[in-house]
Each structure stands twice: as C-alpha cells, then as structure tokens.
Image (spheres, grey):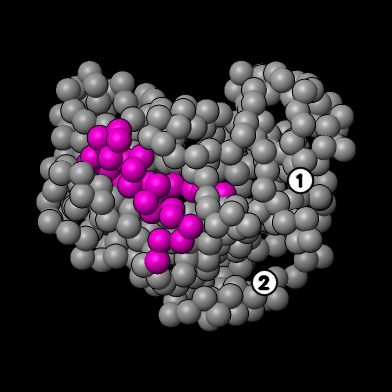
Amino acid sequence: MKLRLHGQETAPNYVKLKAALRPAGMDLVNAGEHFDFILPVFDRGTYDASELAAAAGTYFPDPDFLDKTLLEQKCIAAGIPTLPSMPLADLATCTYDTFIIKPTYWSGSKHPNPAVYTIFTKAELGTALAQTATLQADNFFVQKALIDTATQETYLLFVDGTVNGAGVIHFNSIAEKWMLNPDTPNGHITHKTGIRRVSSEDMFGFKEKVTRLLTTNNIRNTPFKAQVIVDVPFNTCYINDWSWGIMPYTHLNVLDPSYVVDHLCFAYDVIPSVTKPIDKAIVMHHIKFPVAAYDYSEVQFDMVFKPAHADVRRAEPIKQDYLNMPRPEQAYFFVLFGVACESVEEGTRLLAEFQSSIPIQ
C-alpha cells in the first residue's frame, strides 16, 4: 500500500514514520507518484490534501471538521449541543461572563497575538477589543468559556482513535487536560498538563457524541482526534476542536511507532481490529527551560537537557518556527514533554523530577 503524506518530507517525524511503516508494507511516496490514500498528519495542509485526493479519485476525510465554526455547524446538524459563539466582528456586543477568542482554523494552542486562546472576563472586554484590533476578523471567532473561577482552569477531554473502511470505530482511552488562564507576559503560551487515564469509560458522553458525528458524516479510513470542553455542573461536554491523522508527538515520540503502524493498518483495512490499543497512562506537561536554550539546535538541546528516566521524552520541537513567535521576553520558555508508564502518579512524579533538574537562571 502506498501512502502520500502531505507534509515536509525532511521533518524528523516524517523520516521516523517512513521507517516504521515500510516493514508493514506501507510506503510513503513522493509528490507525483501513485498513492492509495493520503495520510493526514499536518493539519495546516489538510485542505490541500483533500483537493489532491479528490483529483486522484481516492478517499480523504472531510477537511471542514478542522474549521471550528464549520465543526460547530456539523455538530448542530447531528443533534449535538454546542457552546454559544459569535463572530469576532461582533465582539463589542459580547455578554458572556467569560469568553475565549479562537482561530477558526489552526493547529495547536499557541498564537503570537496575546488575545488568542486567552480567557477574558466581561470586565476585560475593552482589553480584548484592543488586542484583537489587528486580527483578520474573518479568521477568528468568540466562544463562551467554561472556567472554574477558583482554579482559573478549563477542563478539557481529548480522545483519539481510528475508523476503518466499514465505519467501525476504535477509541483509545480518554485524555484529561486542564488549560490554565495565562497571565504571563507571553500569555499566548498555554500551560497544560495532559493525562491519559487508562479507562474505557465514556466520560460525559464524549465517545457517544464523536460516534454520532463520524457516523452522520460517513467518515471512514482515517485516524482522528477530538477535543471537548466539559461542563461539570451539567454533566456534559461540547465538541470544540478536531483533527485528522495520527498524533505524531505522542505516537512517535512519547510512545513508539508500532502504535501508529497498528492503527493505520486498521484504518486502511489491512487488519480487522486494532491489536495495540493505547492503554498506558500518558502524562504530558510543559517543562520550563532557561531562555538561553531557546537558541539551541534540537541536537544540542537534547544533549544538554537529557532526562534521567529514559521514558521521559520531548514531545514537540523546542520552538514553533512556523508561528513566527518572538523570542520569549522573560527568563524562561516552555517545551512539551511526556511519559508513558503504568500510572498517572508515576508519570507525574517523573516529569516533576525532570523539571526540578532544570536550572532556570
């Protein structure tokens, strides 16, 4: 089977994925070559990948799922409740007690504008209007935020899985994350702790909502990842973000590539069921590093900051160059690390030990 990957062929994750897939009989091919499927991995190229698949007469999942405003419309059409939202152009009339400004289409929770992904209160509407004045209004929207006023946290759930050609869905265990309301000079950096607990429980009806959305839209032959915001008092959740494809940071870096291979074999009907479900506890946390390390190469960074425990691994690049983010103004910056182990407690301890070994001066 030949897979076309719409992304940078020199990227480390691409090279690692290509080496992992070949023994399973799946080859990543270059532009211009025949392919059976396009493998969606890099969200920013999804619309281009969809057009390429259509031209070749092969299947590709609906790219409109990645546009948050279009995703909201799909949820409504499938009978799935959504959070109140409004266009950014109408921000001056916003009456939500707390609200968040999001790009309609973006991969990841970082953005150079300090207003984006920051939670504002009604009293901070003037600040939000001033900070968003230079944004292209059509590319952003305003959503009511659910935030615990005591902890300043938003409770999120993530789940990834795979759907095969017959529409059979495999879910991995649900991940819990808490998004803090950032108040630092670089407030666009979102400090998150992500925990994938080993449980098949459908928390807050999350998997049921995802199943309904996939089935209603006849989605097949693809991995996926969905995110919801949890409304604890009402014991429910709202789908608010989506991506197609594997989670390269987790699957290729924190875990090992065999999980990716197994899930893709199921997605593309090579095997009848997933034989390597992700049932390990996975803990992800942004680790604080001295700002001088921001200028290191990836190789130099990994040599200097090598975790004592082999299972603690860097899960993302040390900086997201494609965002054109400025060099941090304070004395530190954050890089996402993760560990897969037998318990959440163990993973939390290992990451805390790693953080304590980093001098922030």
Instruction: Check disc 2: other Cα within 10 Å, few if <14, some if 14-19, many if 20+.
Output: some
According to the picture, the residue beneath numbered tag 2 turns out to be 355
Residue 1's place in the image compared with 87, above or below, is below
Q: Residue at x 81, y 26 (%)?
A: 129
Q: Is residue 70 magenta?
A: no
Is residue 115 or residue 357 the one in the foreground? Answer: 115
Left or right, 222 with reference to 145: left
Q: What element carries label 2?
A: helix
Q: In which quarter of the image is the C terminus?
A: bottom right
Residue 37's place in the image compared with 207, above or below, is above
Spot occupied by residue 356 in the image (x, y as percentages of width and height): 70, 76
Q: Is mark 1 on a helix, strand or loop?
A: loop
Q: Which residue is drawn at 62% across and 34% down?
A: 84
Q: Quadrant of residue 74?
A: top left
> What separation in Å lies between label 1 and label 2 (alpha carbons)?
20 Å
Q: Looking at the image, is mark 1 or mark 2 earlier in the sequence?
A: 1
| Circle 2: residue type | Gln
Spot occupied by residue 110 in the image (x, y as percentages of width and height): 63, 42
According to the picture, the residue beneath numbered tag 1 turns out to be 187
Left or right, 177 with reference to 332: left
Q: Quadrant of residue 79?
A: top left
| Circle 1: residue type | Gly
Left or right, 277 with reference to 155: left
Q: Which residue is drawn at 50% across and 39% down?
A: 81
Spot occupied by residue 347 in the image (x, y as percentages of width and height): 53, 76
Spot occupied by residue 309 in the image (x, y as percentages of width and height): 52, 79
Q: Which residue lies furthest to the front in this view?
A: 234
Q: Quadrant of the N terminus?
A: top left
Magenta region, residue range: 201-229
